[in-house]
Every structure is written in C-alpha cells, then in structure tokens.
Image (tube, grey):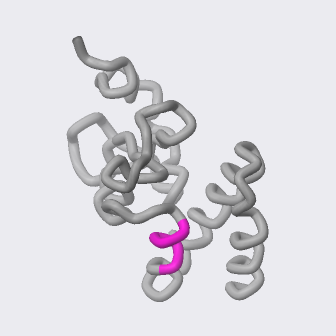
Amino acid sequence: MVSPVRSKSFLAPYVHKPCPFCGVLMGEIGSDFWSPTRDHLTPRSRGGSDCGSNIVICCKRCNEDKDNLTLLEWLNALLFVDDCRANHVLKFADQQSRRNGNGLSNDIRDKQAAQS
C-alpha cells in the first residue's frame, strides 16, 4: 500500500499553488520541473523522518536543487547564486522555525539582515 504522503492524490491540491521555496506556481504532477513533489526538510539520508512536520511540498526544481542538504545548508548555497530564491527560502524557513520552535529563527534573521 502506498503511503498517503507519497501518493499523487496527496500532491494534487498543490497544483497551481506557489512553491514555498521559489514562489513559482507548481504545474501538473509529473509534467516538468515545476510539478509538485514532496521534500524532506531534514533529508532521510541524514536522519530525517517521513512525519508531516519534516515534509514540505515544493516544485521538482527546488527539490532536486536542494538534494540532500538541510534547509540552512541549501540557503547558504543559494545566497551566492540565487538571491530571489534565497529570499523565498528565508521566509519559509523563518515561518517553519517559529511554528516548530526549533531555534532556527535567530540564525535565519541574521541571514536576512546580511541580505539587506
């Protein structure tokens, strides 16, 4: 049996919604780089779980670009090559850290200040 988090029906509501990492509207599932995919904020290869708080729906391009990096590692890499996407990731990461209370907010605010 396929996990609900892994099924296409789980991704369907995200079609034509903005990717939280880049802001581009996600397209049809499986169609191109803009199709919605699920990404692990902490990669499974680095101890992350399949629980809902570790999963975010983002476009395929961002998912593949982030690869097995943590959100902060990816953000550090983006700051040198893609300011626009880095700003989207900063906003998303700040919202996540506030929601989860995991202490990332100060690191993220420091990065935002450095961007200004």
**Residue 80, placed above or below residue 29:** below
Q: Main secondary structure of the magenta part?
A: helix
Q: Residue at x 77, y 51 (%)?
A: 98
Q: Which of the 4 image quarters holds residue 8? A: top left
- In percent of width and height, residue 101 lies at 76, 48
- Report x, y in % for residue 85: 51, 69
Q: Is residue 74 magenta?
A: yes
State the extent of the magenta-drawn residues as a range: 72-76
Position of residue 82 relative to residue 69, above or below, is below
Residue found at x 78% / y 69%: 106
Vertical arrangement, residue 38 with respect to residue 87, above or below:
above
Q: Is residue 89 magenta?
A: no
Vertical comparison of 63 with 74: above or below: above
Image quadrant in which the C terminus is located: bottom right
Q: Nearer the viewer, residue 53 or 92?
A: 53
Q: Is residue 69 left or right of residue 103?
A: left
* Apparent side of residue 1 relative to residue 84 in the rendered image (left or right): left
How far across and how far down the image is residue 50, in percent?
Answer: 41, 34
Query: Which residue is rendered at x = 38% and y = 59% of the image?
Result: 62
Q: Determine the image quadrant of residue 49.
A: top left
The quadrant in which the N terminus is found is top left
Residue extending furthest front?
A: 47
